[in-house]
Amino acid sequence: MENTTVSNPPKKFKLDLKRTFLIGFAFFGILLLWQIYDSWCPTLLTDIFARNVYHLTSADLQLAENQDKLLNVQWIVGIIMACDNLAALILLPIFGNLSDKTKTPIGKRMPYILVGTFVSAIAFPFIPLCFHFNKIVGMVICMAIVLMFMMMYRNPAVALMPDITPKPVRAKANGIINIMGYLGGACATVLGLFLVLSNYIKSPDATRNLWTIELPFIIASVLMVISALVLFFTVKENKIAEEMRDELEAGEKEAAIEVAVDDEKPMPKANKIMLWGILIAEFLWFMCDNAIGTYIGNFIIYYLKASSSNNTILTIVGGVASVAGFATAGFIADKLTRKWTISIGLALYIIGAALFAVVGLTSQNPTINPETGYASLPALMFVVWIIKGYGIALVNTCSFPMVVELCSSKKIGKFTGYYYASSMAAQTVTPVLLGLLFNFTKAWFVLPIYCTVLIIASFAVFTPVVKSVNPNKVSNVKGLEALGGDD
């Protein structure tokens, strides 16, 4: 049932642009680490397990007859990547609930953000160090520490935005937060242009330069700490929450949901259906997107035979498209509702995934340039990354606000935990499942087919199940005024 009631007179909400960007420094640190972790760790794990299980040298890893062995270890790579996410699946709701109930002079989210950041930043550079010296156990332990403390950081950092942002303007705020996150990812991507992972992997064992893989991790740690300190010194959590109390309460009354939230009563059936529809669809789209994030580096290096710098360039192209999506999603949602903005984003991703499948099925015997030792990346891949980058930005901008719309300010951390538990569950399942499929089929082109099936399933769950609740009863301030400071 569409909610078309018009309040009289309508309450106007506007977004504090400066404060939202400052809150975004938390997400800057998250995606900075995540980009390096997802881009580098699967390839490092593939290399270290292949050489230890099959006693291969760096030269052996490049031979065509050893590609099956590289595929055979993908299930181990998947399990290692998934185990970290399994821990996160447990920890995210715990830290969400804990931060909801925490009261300190610096706020309820800030203690978790600071501790999580500093421990992760210390452990992160030890991952490539352990790899370089062939310490598998040490590498896996360091990866686990980083992921667990990032979960302490991630949930409270994300919950901080809805804590001090009225419900009707959270989609715009989430777009800005995600832009800040992608700036963090861009920093990691630029590092990848200068420190090319495939050059390290292909180098003879005796000449491998530790700093090629160590520097991105060290720089990421330093920038993470700086971003957390900027957040701490500029965003006074308790003070802002007190100043925003009246506007936040007014926003609660204007939520775009079928049945109003009441903490004293069980969650209404309509709201439960909406929540489960979002979370199940989210699980599926994260299974798709994380599969690409986890294995695209290996796909480019070992299947397309291209340089890993192409992965960096793809990340830049997709990142620019995503920033465009983050910048426009809130305005599209104002016109079409958040539900249809997400549906459009998923439809675009389906098109991108289908084109990716075409690349996978038509690139089985790439031509190697004898001068460079690499094949050229198919031009269609750039089209794919533009389409899916813009599409997933629309999805991610609007999906999180839809989840926290279904709770009061007292349970934002808890519902943030639901949102990230769904995504982390997907990231627990998908590396293992796809790794097993690689092992079973001995075919890298399973990756795009797998992703196409999942994103279609996500669209099929989300679009018919989740209601389009019309937020037109809210009069959001338009244009630049909507992004202005508080009067």
Image (cartoon, rainbow, N blue to C red):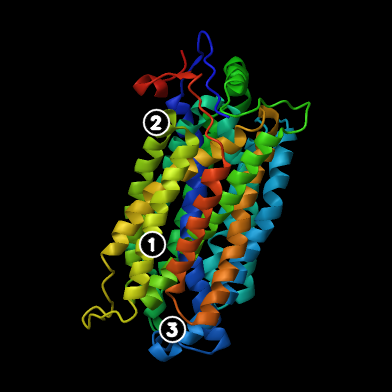
Work out which quarter of the rendered image holds the N terminus and state it. top right
- Between disc 2 and disc 3, whose residue precedes? 3
Q: Residue 329: x, y in percent?
A: 41, 37
Q: Which amino acid does label 3 sit on?
A: Asp
For the residue labelled by badge 1, is the local secondary structure a helix, a strand or a loop? helix
Relative to 127, 451 lies left or right: left
Relative to 456, 187 lies left or right: left
**Residue ID for mark 2:** 331
Which image quarter: residue 477?
A: top left
Using the image as rendered, state which of residue 188 and residue 290 is in the foreground.
Answer: 290
- Between disc 1 and disc 3, whose residue precedes? 3
Residue 37 in sight: no
**Residue ID for mark 1:** 354
Dot 2 alpha-carbon crowd within 10 angstroms: few under 14, some 14 to 19, many 20 or more: some
Residue 179 vs 287, above or below: the answer is above
Q: Residue 465: x, y in percent?
A: 58, 43
Dot 3 alpha-carbon crowd within 10 angstroms: few under 14, some 14 to 19, many 20 or more: few
Residue 106 vs 28, above or below: the answer is above
Q: Residue 93: x, y in percent?
A: 70, 46
Q: Which amino acid does label 1 sit on?
A: Ala
Relative to 159, 223 lies left or right: left
Please identify, in this view, whether the residue under mark 2 or under mark 3 is nearer the observer: 2
Query: Which residue is drawn at the image coordinates 28% and 69% (left, top)?
Result: 377
**Residue ID for mark 3:** 205
Dot 1 alpha-carbon crowd within 10 angstroms: few under 14, some 14 to 19, many 20 or more: many
